[in-house]
Amino acid sequence: MMSLNRSCFLGNPAIAGSSSPFSHSQKRRSASLKVVALVPKTRTGDRNGSVVMESTLQEVKDESSVVELKSTVHGGVQDVYGEDTATEDQFVTPWSVSVASGYTLIRDPHHNKGLAFTEKERDAHYLRGLLPPVVISQELQVKKMINCIRQYLVPLQKYIAMMDLQGRNEKLFYKLLINHVEELLPVVYTPTVGEACQKYGSIFTHPHGLFISLKDKGKILEVLRNWPEKNIQVIVVTDGERILGLGDLGCHGMGIPVGKLALYTALGGVRPSACLPVTIDVGTNNQKLLDDEFYIGLRQKRATGQEYAELLQEFMTAVKQNYGEKILVQFEDFANHNAFDLLAKYGTTHLVFNDDIQGTASVVLGGLVAALKLVGGSLADHRFLFLGAGEAGTGIAELIALEVSKQTNIPVEETRKNIWLVDSKGLIVSSRKESLQHFKKPWAHEHEPVKELVDAVNAIKPTVLIGTSGAGRTFTKEVVESMASLNERPIILALSNPTSQSECTAEEAYTWTQGRAIYCSGSPFPPVEYEGKVYTPGQANNAYIFPGFGLGLIMSGTIRVHDDMLLAASEALASQVSQEDYDKGLIYPPFTNIRKISAHIAAKVAAKSYELGLATRLPEPKDLEKYAESCMYSPSYRSFR
């Protein structure tokens, strides 16, 4: 809502008695204030048909139009709008000052600089007395904040402190996150975000995103227009049904879009004002949440079928209508039965991306391509076994098959035969095909049924074991030792999040393979010492891919996602692993260089988009990597006039 301009109100000589809006004249301190009536006026131009309240200062005709208000009202001096004298059943207009000065400025997270406001800025923006007299740099603020964060012993407390900082001082939040990315990434995202989602109702103080529920059906376009930022470039949306490996958390899933978009800005350089976190609340089947007095969502069982589809259809239509063809919609943590359908349905009409299916696939493929330098051979020479055949498992498997097909010119139907999946009922084989969900059917190969994972390992003899099951400790000692007996350097990827759901720990993998495993997890594990040698486990974190991938789509004006872009992102990530990283047994680069990595990935994704004719920002920049870096948001403080 547009509101009264401070300079307009206090700068009118008929009101303030001075031509200077904030002069130090004694007139400003008069016991009474002469004001002109404020008339709310509706207009339709700014919001494409929606009603906006605008404050208009009526022209002063003569002294009789001026009302003198004495300081006799209940709430204090000069209650201009009559709010304090209104009774509870009377309506008042929530006027606010729109000029970012004084108290308003230091309460605005987009512009607040805390104690970094200079002396000149404090004078120009009426901050004298509102801040302690000291002026400190942003760098010193970062040092102070990281020391404060480190005082908390409980990860959730660190998460709450970081979210509080984001709501107070946006640039300091991102500066802190960028400067200490390896330390704070597990705080603002996995694994801590999982606990934050579980307890979201208890820790919720103010909204960081947009909540759209079944109550808003038929009004979603208006709900989108309620968001204060208008130039949105990327939306991360969840319905909360499958949050990490924690299951249905309903409306509490908002922690995921908020966390993902914080990484879009910190790691990929997408400006925060262009990011919109959304939760679609259709209820929850989690009875514990429905019985929780602090639950913030709809208290009903999940809507399904036509009711669900219609709500999502209205949302996707409204998104394109409000933000245009090039808005990126990233689906997060939808249940399998919806995730695949939504990606297939809207992939041909919208710019959509599912991080659980496509992002995970791309980051894992990048790690596997890098791992070839440690184990030798090509992807086609390796055999893959997955525990888990949901979004992540089948997404990774399909991208591996596509990459092998691209390298060998063998049809993808053939390259799939070197990739095997195990679900809750055992190895996926052709005799089970009739009872399988559609996304599992391409992986039903000829083989006798096998129930247990260890038996599948011994039968298939994989070189790579990948866990996407969401079930902790399922890579047992027997399973890992079997992998070690079959391979000199077994590749073991325990990818389920959060840490408690990891298929095995780093310590278990290194110990049970006598230090020979090439190990990665989804959530971070500390270094492991085994027989006098320190092993540093890698993390197959989607944050390597999606921020740079999204930046590449945005900066090229891409209108559709193509699988070749995912392959380009994987190859770009693998190319960033240095010899020093390989010497440590790592197959991913350190996060300390993540913004440069993201710029490199963005450039390769954009180049593929231009090659495929899907980019709309023309002409194509000559140096895409430099262009990507130039597009990235900087969280450094700006100087104010």
Image: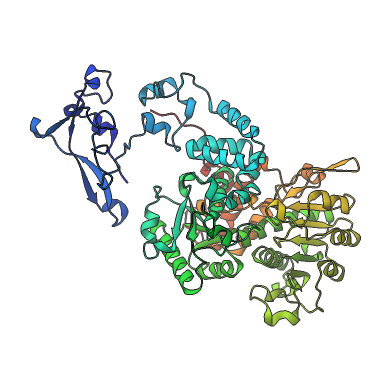
Horizontal side of residue 411 vs 561, given as left or right: right
Q: Name the residue: 78% across, 79% down.
A: 446
**Colouring of the image:** rainbow
Q: Position of residue 195 (x, y in %)?
A: 62, 49
Q: Position of residue 364 (x, y in %)?
A: 70, 57
Residue 544 shows up from this direction: yes
* Looking at the image, residue 28 lies above or below residue 55: above
Of residues 625 and 306, the one nearer the viewer is: 306
Q: Position of residue 363 (x, y in %)?
A: 67, 55
Of residues 260 and 130, the one nearer the viewer is: 130
Q: Position of residue 166 (x, y in %)?
A: 51, 40
* Looking at the image, residue 178 lies above or below residue 144: below
Horizontal side of residue 591 vs 253, given as left or right: right
Q: Name the residue: 36% across, 58% down.
A: 222
Residue 261 shows up from this direction: no
Q: Quadrant of residue 144?
A: top right
Where's the C terminus, which quadrant? top left
* Looking at the image, residue 469 lies above or below residue 183: below
Label count reads: 0
Of residues 395 and 577, the one nearer the viewer is: 395
